[in-house]
């Protein structure tokens, strides 16, 4: 077959030569390690988990404050706006506790997965500078995404801590009287109008809010790191198959076998990652839909007030949180499926001769193309994490907002 007759597709590897960075050594960044270290020693070789139990006190704090948030929800069930505010806090605590429990339950699986990533990254980076550049390009993109997500999450956390003082300040300025406000709407059995009780309740609530941030930031950004490196592995497989050359049929088959082994290893790691994150993605999407409808309703009511800035930042954080999973899932599906086109664009026809060996190579190429055509899909049990799912979440939230406004 003449190579000039083949329909060429733009290669995703065209800009590789522009990158000149040293080889990466781990699939997670330093600040991600620090975040997980604040919970327990995940990245150390020592398997003893609770060497420093004080690191998880913030998560224990949100677990202890959960009943008081639930009491606020039940107390305000007749007031739509106050109920929506309390429901947002309740959903946040549920998601934070669920993610922390998944960290505990899947800790050893995460450790094994990280070790696999480190080993494969080291092996591929040692095989050539161009492969190390592909890995570094993926990690640069991952760090930009994670930095944006972390900034939005920390901004929402800071505004959540400052908002009570803003509300009390405006209330005092307008009426000369201010009711005590807390970061989380809680119904305590003690009188928070007493200064000592209010300070204790505020510190407890603000401290517990970090228990929401840590599991979310750690799990979500590490998922982004995992998928970015998996996409890099698929790109390396594409790079290798497009540029493979064999002096003989035996050499061509051996080269292709190594490429196919890399692709299959990447698929196996995708399967391991999806198995770990399926319940997390399912809970994230379900709760994010409810959070968006509640926050969107509150934002539409308080648009011209000081609380509008807080709710807007919170909405942005929730959207980015759902977007990370959908964007990473879409990228992983695309890169794993692009291997089919890489095989098609490869110079396989230049390395074939006559005989049974040639037929064997053609058969292996066809089987690999059939498998690559399906790609790999990150799922949350009932749905696929892609940009279509992200659009569905936003549309559903808008419908809920319209329904809530009709009740107010």
Image (cartoon, rainbow, N blue to C red):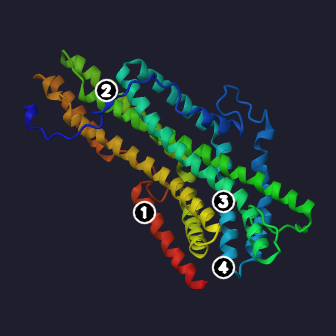
Q: In percent of the image, x 21 and y 33: which residue is there?
A: 363
Q: In percent of the image, x 61 and y 43: which residue is there?
A: 218
**What is the number of the mark on residue 17?**
2
Please, is residue 103 above or below residue 361 in the view? below
The reply to whether callout 1 and callout 4 are in contact (CB within 8 Å) is no
**Distance from Cα at disc 2 to Cα at disc 1:** 35 Å
> In this rendering, does residue 272 appear at all?
no
Q: Residues within 10 Å of mark 3 (few under 14, many from 20)?
A: many
Query: Seen from this angle, which residue lies furthest top?
Result: 247
Q: Which residue is mark 4?
A: 80
Q: Which residue is mark 3?
A: 92
Between circles 2 and 1, the one closer to the viewer is 2
> In this rendering, does residue 357 appear at all?
yes
Q: Quadrant of the N terminus?
A: top left
**Hey, which quadrant is residue 298 in on the image?**
bottom right
Q: Nearer the viewer, residue 327 or 67?
A: 327
**Distance from Cα at disc 2 to Cα at disc 4:** 57 Å
* Residue 244, x across and y down, in percent: 24, 23
Q: Which residue is mark 1?
A: 391
SS of the residue under disc 3: helix
Q: Earlier in the sequence, mark 2 or mark 1?
A: 2
Between circles 2 and 4, the one closer to the viewer is 2
């Amino acid at each position: 077959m003449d190579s000039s007759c083949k329909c060429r597709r733009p290669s995703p590897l065209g800009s590789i030569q522009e990158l000149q960075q040293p080889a990466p050594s781990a699939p997670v960044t330093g600040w991600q390690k620090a975040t997980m270290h604040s919970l327990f020693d995940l990245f150390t070789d020592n398997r003893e988990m609770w060497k420093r139990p004080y690191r998880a006190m913030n998560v224990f704090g949100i677990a202890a404050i959960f009943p008081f948030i639930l009491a606020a929800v039940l107390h305000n069930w007749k007031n739509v706006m106050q109920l929506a505010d309390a429901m947002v806090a309740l959903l946040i605590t549920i998601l934070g506790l669920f993610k922390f429990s998944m960290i505990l339950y899947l800790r050893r699986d995460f450790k094994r997965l990280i070790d696999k990533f480190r080993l494969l990254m080291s092996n591929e980076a040692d095989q050539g500078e161009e492969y190390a550049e592909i890995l570094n390009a993926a990690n640069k993109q991952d760090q930009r995404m994670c930095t944006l997500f972390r900034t939005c999450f920390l901004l929402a956390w800071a505004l959540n801590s400052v908002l009570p003082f803003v509300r009390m300040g405006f209330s005092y300025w307008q009426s000369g009287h201010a009711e005590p406000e807390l970061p989380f709407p809680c119904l305590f059995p003690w009188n928070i109008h007493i200064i000592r009780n209010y300070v204790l309740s505020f510190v407890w609530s603000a401290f517990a809010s970090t228990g929401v941030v840590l599991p979310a930031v750690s799990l979500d950004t590490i998922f982004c790191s995992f998928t970015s490196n998996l996409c890099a592995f698929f790109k390396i497989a594409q790079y290798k198959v497009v540029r493979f050359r064999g002096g003989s049929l035996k050499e061509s088959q051996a080269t292709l076998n190594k490429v196919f082994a890399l692709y299959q290893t990447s698929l196996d790691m995708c399967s391991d990652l999806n198995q770990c994150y399926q319940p997390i993605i399912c809970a994230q999407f379900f709760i994010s839909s409810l959070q968006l409808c509640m926050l969107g309703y509150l934002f539409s009511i308080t648009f011209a007030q000081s609380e509008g800035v807080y709710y807007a930042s919170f909405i942005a954080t929730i959207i980015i949180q759902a977007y990370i999973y959908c964007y990473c899932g879409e990228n992983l599906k695309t890169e794993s499926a692009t291997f089919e086109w890489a095989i098609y664009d490869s110079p396989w026809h230049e390395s074939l001769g006559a005989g049974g060996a040639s037929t064997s190579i053609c058969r292996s190429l066809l089987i690999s193309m059939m498998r690559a055509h399906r790609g790999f899909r990150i799922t949350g049990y009932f749905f696929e994490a892609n940009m279509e799912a992200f659009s569905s979440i936003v549309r559903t939230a808008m419908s809920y907002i319209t329904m809530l406004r009709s009740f107010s």
